Amino acid sequence: MRITPPNLNIFMLFKLPSAFFTGVRLRKITNKIAVVKVTHRWVNQNPFNSLYYGVQAMAAELSTGALVMKKIQECGKPVSMLVTKQNATFTKKGRGRIAFVCEDGEAIDEKLQEALVTGEGQVIVLTAVATDAQGDIVSAFEFEWSIKLKKPKK
């Protein structure tokens, strides 16, 4: 499967249904950036009438993970990926349409190349920042991803 917004959104329906049904959608992906959007609605709200933090975490993880998946696909080698740590800061209630942006594509290139050359696992911290329609920061997430070249099967 080629990593494109339509393909990844269909993938979510079958592999990440909770993200799909709460409205998390990949809107843009390039070699440098991934943008995921979600709109605050009844199905994804918390008791305080704002976007539930778990939905924010899914959207933020997708913005970082989609970039990692794209880079792995482009390298043509079997590489595993796993979130090993996550940290978040919430600064404003998420209402309306929220955009989660990860701009760490070049950093992924460096670590992926290092993993391919050395054959050793690498760790990279990727950031996703969520903003509302007014441009105010709603939350910021850091995901520590481990990437490792898979060993050939015997």
Image (cartoon, rainbow, N blue to C red):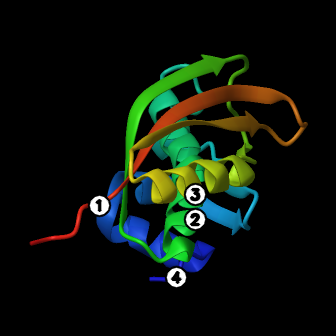
Is residue 23 visible to us here?
no
Residue at mark 4 to residue at mark 3: CA–CA distance? 20 Å
Residue wearing tag 2: 71
Query: Which residue corresponds to the image point at 51% horizontal and 52% vertical from the top-left?
Result: 65
Amino acid type indicated by mark 4:
Arg
In-front residue for pair 140/112: 112
As helix, strand or loop, the secondary structure at mark 3 comes to helix
Query: Which residue corresponds to the image point at 60% horizontal and 76% vertical from the top-left?
Result: 4
Q: Which mark is residue 59?
A: none
Residue wearing tag 4: 2
Identify the residue at the far right of this view. Answer: 134
Residue at mark 1 to residue at mark 4: CA–CA distance? 20 Å
Mark toward the start of the polypeptide (4 vs 3): 4
Mark 3 Cα-neighbour bin, 10 Å: few <14, some 14–19, many ≥20: few
Q: Nearer the viewer, mark 2 or mark 1?
A: 1
| Labelled pair 2, 1 in contact (Cβ < 8 Å) | no
Residue wearing tag 3: 113
Image coordinates of residue 34 in percent, x first then y, are: 69, 57
Residue wearing tag 1: 150
Q: Is residue 99 above or below residue 66?
A: above
Residue at mark 2 to residue at mark 3: CA–CA distance? 10 Å
In-front residue for pair 147/63: 147
Amino acid type indicated by mark 2:
Lys
Mark 4 Cα-neighbour bin, 10 Å: few <14, some 14–19, many ≥20: few
